[in-house]
Amino acid sequence: MEIKEGTLKLNNGENLSVPEAEQIAQSLTESKIPAEDKKTFLKSLHKCGESRTEIEGFSNVFQEASLNPELEDIASDSIDVCGTGGDHSGSYNISTTVAMILASAEVPVIKHGNRSITSKCGSAQFLEALGLKINLDLEIHKKAMEKLNFTFLFAPSFHPAFKEIMPVRQELASEGQSTIFNILGPLINPAKPAHQLLGVYSRKLLTEMASSLHNKGLKAGFTANCQTSKEEPDIDEVSCAGINHIVGFGRLSKESCQFEAAKFKLSNCKVEDLRGGEIAENLTLLDKIKNNTVQKGLKETIFLNAGIAFYIVNKTNSIQEGIQLASDTVLSGQLNRWIETAKNFYQEI
């Protein structure tokens, strides 16, 4: 399907099929297609609302076009924990901290991410400030998984197909225009870990993104969103600050539900309790988490997310057990020891 034909179909209120979305996604990577045609299509797609088939088609193309990190031997046991971003909540680096808790409890984590545009301290900036390198040779990724149960796949290093579309994305972003690329990152981890906890900034996209991951053949996971209040935007992760909506896929496809913190014997908190700041402030918060001096709302939100992730990978038999394991991992000093080991590892390579 030609890109103009796809735009016309969208403007007529019709969704693209998976093959049609794949064809157009491929054309977006080609220099011969005029930038204006690309812009018009992406605007129309967002206006209509990205459907499951369109999300699936785009993610198929860009994941297959990514460079292979050669982690197939560990991918089937691994998990990615990340969010779409774009909720403008200014929250602390919850998913990155959760990833470190999982890794310190011997769960393999292959985290895929980039430098943040919408927050002051994204996952890449946070890890770098902590002393963990993010731009690595393939052999180092393998060694990191062996030594740390963790590696970070820095998106620009693995997705050359984005080069051609980047100027169009930047132009649309300068106009305040969101596109399908704002939600694509968590769906195109080049290592293809078999489990995922994916935070989504919009409840409207939870089912579509879960369906896409289910159809990709992932073993298990949830897409997640927290509805806080009419005054505050939804949060792109589970939290103790509102009503959580999770949609399961793979083994957990029948476990979609809504819940609040009390369901897991945790306390409700305010959105303000989850906020972070500049890199230095977030590193200070991490120290407080390790030392159990951080305020309760943030601590329990981190334990809740980690507990769900432990359940996804079958490390525990329930989310409640996972929350306890997360708490034990942090309070016993296991997380702190892992961080020191990680710092030493990256200093030596």
Image: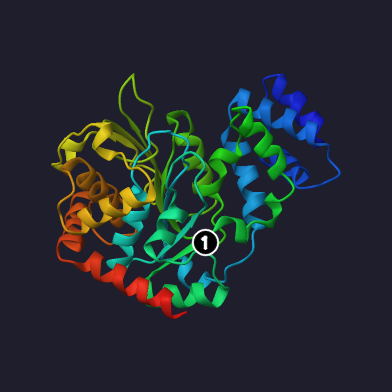
Residue farthest along the bottom direction in this orientation = 348
How many discs mark residues in the rendered view?
1
Q: Quadrant of residue 336?
A: bottom left
Identify which residue, 2 or 294, lies in the foreground.
Answer: 294
Q: Nearer the viewer, residue 10 or 276?
A: 276
- For label 1, the crowd category at 10 Å Cα-Cα, with few meaning under 14, some 14 to 19 and many 20 or more, is many
In the image, residue 193 lies at what x, y percent?
Answer: 48, 60
Rendering quarter of residue 139 = bottom right
The picture places residue 132, in percent across and down from the top left corner, at 42, 66
Is residue 19 visible to the viewer in this orientation of the structure?
no
| Placement of 55 over or under 250, stated as above or below | above
Vertical order, 309 against 232 (above or below): below
Q: Position of residue 204 (x, y in %)?
A: 47, 28
Give the residue type that dot 1 points to.
Answer: Leu
| Residue at the spot 40% in from the left edge and 66% down from the top edge | 131
x then y, percent, for residue 214 = 49, 47
